[in-house]
Amino acid sequence: MNKRKVGNVLGITSIVLIIISIIFFYIERGPSADIYFIINIYGILSILGILFAIFSWLMSKRLILPIIGLIGNVVILAVAYLLLLAMGISEP
């Protein structure tokens, strides 16, 4: 595989990680959900997605896949941070 194909695969993988995070959001809901586990999963998936988007940006000439992957994963990382902040505020 050449660099361009690898870059496209990494860009698509970055977008797939966004979709997995959204699916995980709808699966793990409710009062019995472990919020810290959810925050860890969001953090791990979004950091991996950001890394894949950056590597995709460096390897391919197409910019649409890495930009969508980078923006989506940064939004998910921000949601995870806000959840962590809300859990810190709510505990005495």
Image (tube, helix red, strand yellow):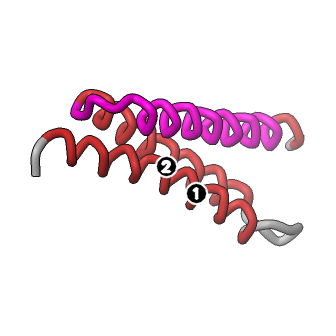
| Quarter of the C terminus within the rendering | top right
Q: Which mark is residue 54?
A: none
How crowded pointer 2 is (Cα within 10 Å; few <14, some 14-19, many 20+) is rated as: many
Residue topped by disc 1: 19
Q: Which mark is residue 15?
A: 2
Vertical position of residue 71 compared to residue 44: above or below: above
Q: Left or right: where does residue 57 sit relative to residue 18?
A: left
Res. 85 image quadrant: top right
Residue 76 inside the magenta-drawn segment:
yes
Res. 36 image quadrant: bottom right
Badge 2 amino acid? Ile
Disc 1 + disc 2, Cβ < 8 Å: yes
Residue at 56% from the left image edge and 56% from the top image edge: 41
What percent of the width, then of the height, locates residue 58? 25, 28
Q: Secondary structure at mark 1?
A: helix
What percent of the width, then of the height, locates residue 78? 66, 33
Residue at 48% from the left image edge and 56% from the top image edge: 16
**Residue range (magenta):** 59-88
